[in-house]
Image: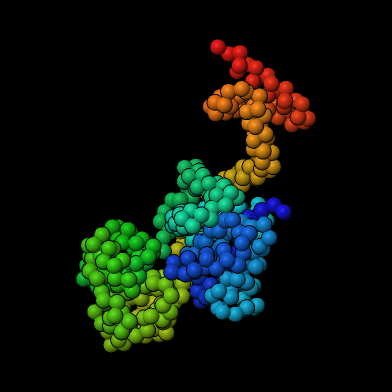
């Protein structure tokens, strides 16, 4: 049986942020999950994990392992039980063409909560590096990812789909500007909780806002120290975060994973406090939103605000879809030619052995040169030549004689 490229997905289109949080694979869980998948399903030759704030997608290359098997494995891995009810939250496919199209659409930003989200391609690249590091590219998967990178470049160069900033990090920083009076912004004390990709983006986009009273706190202090030095900000002790000691902060943006309701206590007598929860698991207790002095935003609320940008990008959607379909057709052509490539590869081995037996010299460079010349002849006339071996033998003899008689 041939290999197929398959996928499962739970996203903002199929589940709420709370439901998605149950199946989010954190950075700390990645290695464990991959190790268990390899142990359980030994026919998987390619595995690609895309875990963002809006989706958990798994793309994999296998002979027998199906998408529903991986879906059920993920559910049990995350919940410890076979949760039959929540199977409905996942989209699945076992068809290579559908899987590649899905990956192309996701990477283009067509499936993002904010149409055309530019951050998704950075998350795709990060997941690709993880797959390479664990030797899990797979031929079908690697080819699909090359199509992704090519289509991304074309979309950026040939359309206006990437115009405007739609980053969750950028929007979070803009909310600070919208919530507080302009002349008070310089004095606002801001805390970033976490040290992952989103916090890095917060620092990146802060160049546009210039908030200069920022603190960072993270469970692993070394990562917090690195970011604080890189971005000239202060460190806030992680134990104080665990104790919910936030008396001095006007803004708390939390993007830490695996800490549900980490932040659950803000003094009610304090002046206005802005809480922004960018974690899938809900690291800020949403019950805090009921306090009069608190303005609260979570992923869904921010994504809703960003929909204004989405309207401006609809004009380019048709162009993007054309590019996606073109790259998909190129992939399908490559896929259809796979049997021919395998045939030619095996044929090259046969020809190489034949040339080696005919030539009296054992010069590997000469053997390789004659073999390559025979292969070029065959490929040039492939519609006629892939027949009886007598035809191929004639070409081999012809090329060997030419080589022998060449001064």
Q: Nearer the viewer, residue 173 or 15?
A: 15
Q: Nearer the viewer, residue 309 or 156?
A: 156
Quarter of the image for the C terminus: give it.
Answer: top right
Instruction: Left or right? Give the position of 122 relative to 8.
Output: left
Q: Nearer the viewer, residue 13 or 370?
A: 370
Which residue is located at x 65 percent, y 17 percent?
401
Q: Is residue 68 visible?
A: yes
Quarter of the image for the N terminus: give it.
Answer: bottom right
Against 386, residue 203 (above or below) is below
Which residue is located at x 55 percent, y 68 percent?
36
Instruction: Left or right? Give the position of 71 relative to 121.
Output: right
Residue 166, picture quadrant: bottom left
Which residue is located at x 57 percent, y 63 percent?
38
Image position, residue 358 (x, y; %): 66, 24
Image position, residue 143 (x, y; %): 57, 47
Q: Is residue 104 visible?
A: no
Instruction: Left or right? Give the position of 242 relative to 140.
Output: left
Which residue is located at x 75 percent, y 25 percent?
391
């Amino acid at each position: 049986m041939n290999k197929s490229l398959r996928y499962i997905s739970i996203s903002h289109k199929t589940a709420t942020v709370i439901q998605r949080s149950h199946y989010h694979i954190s950075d700390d869980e990645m290695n464990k999950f991959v190790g268990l998948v390899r142990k359980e399903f030994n026919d998987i030759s390619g595995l690609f994990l895309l875990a963002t704030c809006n989706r958990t997608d798994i793309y994999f290359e296998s002979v027998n392992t199906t998408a529903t098997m991986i879906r059920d494995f993920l559910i049990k891995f995350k919940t410890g039980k076979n949760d039959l009810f929540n199977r409905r939250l996942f989209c699945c496919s076992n068809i290579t063409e559908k899987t590649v199209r899905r990956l192309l659409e996701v990477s283009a930003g067509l499936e993002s909560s904010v149409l055309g989200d530019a951050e998704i391609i950075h998350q795709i690249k990060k997941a690709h590096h993880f797959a390479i590091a664990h030797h899990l590219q797979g031929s079908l998967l690697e080819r699909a990812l090359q199509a992704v990178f090519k289509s991304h470049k074309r979309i950026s160069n040939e359309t206006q789909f990437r115009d405007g900033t739609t980053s969750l990090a950028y929007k979070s920083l803009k909310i600070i500007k919208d919530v507080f009076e302009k002349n008070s912004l310089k004095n606002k004390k801001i805390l970033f909780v976490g040290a992952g990709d989103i916090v890095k983006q917060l620092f990146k986009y802060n160049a546009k806002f210039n908030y200069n009273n920022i603190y960072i706190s993270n469970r692993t202090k070394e990562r917090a120290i690195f970011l604080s030095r890189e971005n000239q900000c202060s460190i806030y002790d992680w134990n104080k975060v665990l104790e919910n000691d936030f008396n001095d902060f006007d803004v708390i943006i939390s993007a830490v994973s695996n800490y549900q309701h980490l932040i659950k206590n803000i003094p009610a007598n304090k002046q206005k406090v802005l809480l922004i929860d960018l974690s899938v698991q809900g690291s800020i207790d949403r019950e805090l939103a009921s306090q009069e002095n608190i303005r609260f935003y979570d992923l869904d609320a921010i994504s809703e605000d960003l929909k204004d940008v989405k309207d401006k990008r609809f004009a380019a959607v048709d162009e993007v879809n054309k590019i996606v379909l073109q790259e998909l057709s190129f992939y399908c052509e490559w896929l259809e030619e796979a049997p021919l490539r395998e045939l030619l590869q095996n044929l090259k081995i046969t020809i190489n052995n034949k040339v080696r037996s005919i030539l009296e010299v054992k010069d590997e460079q000469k053997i390789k040169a004659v073999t390559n010349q025979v292969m070029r002849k065959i490929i040039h006339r492939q519609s006629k030549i892939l027949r009886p071996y007598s035809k191929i033998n004639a070409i081999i003899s012809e090329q060997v004689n030419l080589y022998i008689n060449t001064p």
